Image (spheres, rainbow, N blue to C red):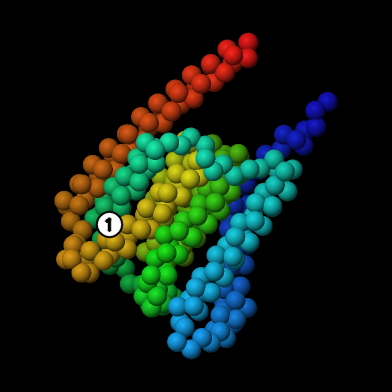
Amino acid sequence: MENQASKSKFELSVLGAVWIVVFYTLIISALIGGPFSGIYDSISFENMENTKEIIGMLGKIILRIIIVILAVKNAKKISDNNFKIKYVGKLNCKLLLSVILVIIGYYLWYQSSIGVIIDKIPLNGWFKEALKDMELHPYYEFFFGATVIPIFEEIFMRGIILAGLLNRYNPKKAIIISALIFGAWHFNIHQSVNATLIGLILGMIYYKTNSLILCIVLHMTNNIFAPIISVAEEYMGYSPNMISFFVGVIIFLGSGMLFFRYLKELDEKLGMDKLYKNREVL
């Protein structure tokens, strides 16, 4: 009789997903705000501020790598070692281009509609301080936000959390739950609303393709495009308006249709390849 444990899947309930996110967030907060912060502040490089910032960034990267390793080990333990992050899945250049355009279109219509309302809400204290700290070292923060954050958050939120939810709930429910958790994870209204909506898009793409790479590229594009728009608003006189809203809607819908078209083409190609392989075996 086949061992039933070998069929175990990594499943997460809503409470389980929330607990994992809270647990590892507390670890990050405790280490960055505690020992790591103390060590970082004690470093003194006269006339070498850039070196200190690089060391600080490397420390944050290492911490996130450790968090991912621990989370993956926990997922494997829960599933009797029957868990693996799906990095590639369904992937080609057409799908890659379409998701980049999807997020650009989304960002344009969001900033020209919901974003206008959200921007009128006063910033809370800690988020205002965080933005001031980012302004002190914009290049390092841009690099960190455009590369490290998307990779870490996608592996953690889509590769682990959403994967576990999809094994327990129907796709629609799992995607909505993961998006809400992703939004709440940002701890402030200015980012949470946007993160929740983007989380829905990312969740759908991950479910349809099993490709974490596509999700990472989409997330990177958003984190790169956002500061570009901010610079355009501050120095070039750009401001969200009805034109940017409709341009965004057209790009978003058009690229979304292309995404599903390219996905269908890829599915058909994979189906034909599988058929030919089966014939060769026979």
The residue under the point 64% across, 56% down is 69
The residue under the point 53% across, 57% down is 152
* Percent position of residue 157, x then y: 53, 52
The residue under the point 63% across, 61% down is 66
Examine the image and state in which quarter residue 70 appears: bottom right
Q: Is residue 213 left or right of residue 256?
A: right
- Would you say residue 185 is visible in this rendering? yes
The residue under the point 69% across, 40% down is 82
The number of numbered badges drawn on the structure is: 1
* Percent position of residue 243, x then y: 16, 51
- Would you say residue 128 is visible in this rendering? no
Type of the residue with mark 1: Gln
Question: Is the residue 26 above or below the residue 244 in the image?
Answer: below
Examine the image and state in which quarter residue 278 appears: top right
* Percent position of residue 55, x then y: 53, 74
* Percent position of residue 93, x then y: 39, 38
Residue nearest the observer in this picture, 34 or 190: 34
- The residue pinned by badge 1 equals 111
Q: Is residue 231 left or right of residue 17?
A: left
Q: Residues within 10 Å of mark 1 (few under 14, many from 20)?
A: many
Residue nearest the observer in this picture, 144 or 49: 49
The residue furthest bottom is 46
